[in-house]
Image (spheres, coloured by chain):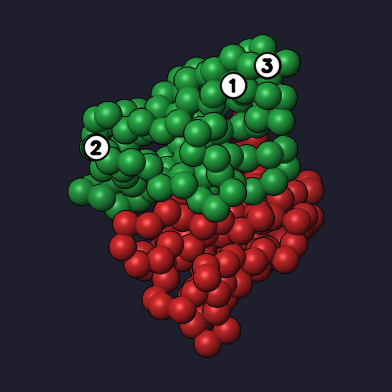
Amino acid sequence: GAVVSQHPSWVICKSGTSVKIECRSLDFQATTMFWYRQFPKQSLMLMATSNEGSKATYEQGVEKDKFLINHASLTLSTLTVTSAHPEDSSFYICSARDLEGTDTQYFGPGTRLTVL
Amino acid sequence: AQRVTQPEKLLSVFKGAPVELKCNYSYSGSPELFWYVQYSRQRLQLLLRHISRESIKGFTADLNKGETSFHLKKPFAQEEDSAMYYCALRGQGNTPLVFGKGTRLSVIA
């Protein structure tokens, strides 16, 4: 069945550095992918909608210059956390909707980011 | 505005007892409603959606437009049902899912 993969599954970085997280849809093409953030024991909060070939749409309160999103192909979206700070430490989850197939929104396994 | 409310953070039931996880929503149009489940150390996965009107792992959920509810029910809980359950809403068009805060179900042997 349709699967969404994320890489890396976890990353530790120093404050001030940038981190790139990849999200791939396997077995289906996704013109739209979604990036969520999940704090410990809390729900998923939508950060942005990633659109293939165009600019991402950010939710209110999410800094677009801090969280750069690129959706270069129908199967790949990347989230780059720029100049990371400890408060950016979180679990980042991507999701893609299989519009042509099951019309189900599938989720990646998540990436745990720890900023020291 | 879209909003999903799950009033219970934690629900503990004994094995074999009935389970009902509550979900209420607000949306001005005709939404799609979903239940997602997250087992320990696993990714979020779709449990069921209201348009399918099917039973998955013994769980059912009926959309009640009058009460704007989409409660998840199972007549006899099993230990393997212990997980985090999220109710989610999707508006019209290619829009993202909006999640409730989730309910942790703990089934006690």
Q: Amino acid at mark 2?
A: Gly
Q: Which mark is residue A53?
A: 2
Label 3 residue SS: loop
Label 1, label 3: how far apart the Cα atoms are? 7 Å
Q: Is residue A84 visible?
A: yes
The answer to the question of whether label 2 and label 3 lie on touching residues, with beta carbons closer than 8 A, is no
Observer-nearest of B30 and A59: A59
- Decide: is A106 above or below A4: below
Image x and y of residue A9, in percent: 53, 20
Mark 2 neighbour density, 10 Å: few (under 14) some (14–19) many (20 or more): few
Q: Amino acid at mark 1?
A: Ser
Q: Which mark is residue A15?
A: 3
Residue in the image at 36% along x and 31% along y: A70
Q: Is residue A12 visible?
A: no
Label 2, label 3: how far apart the Cα atoms are? 31 Å
- Decide: is B79 above or below B64: above
Image x and y of residue B41, in percent: 62, 30
Can you tell which chain is drawn red?
A: B
Mark 3 neighbour density, 10 Å: few (under 14) some (14–19) many (20 or more): some
Label 1 residue SS: loop
Observer-nearest of B50 and A60: A60
Closer mark to the observer between disc 1 and disc 2:
1
Q: Amino acid at mark 3?
A: Ser
Q: Please tell me in which quadrant of the rendered image residue A86 appears.
A: top right
Q: Chain of mark 3?
A: A
Chain A tint as drawn: green
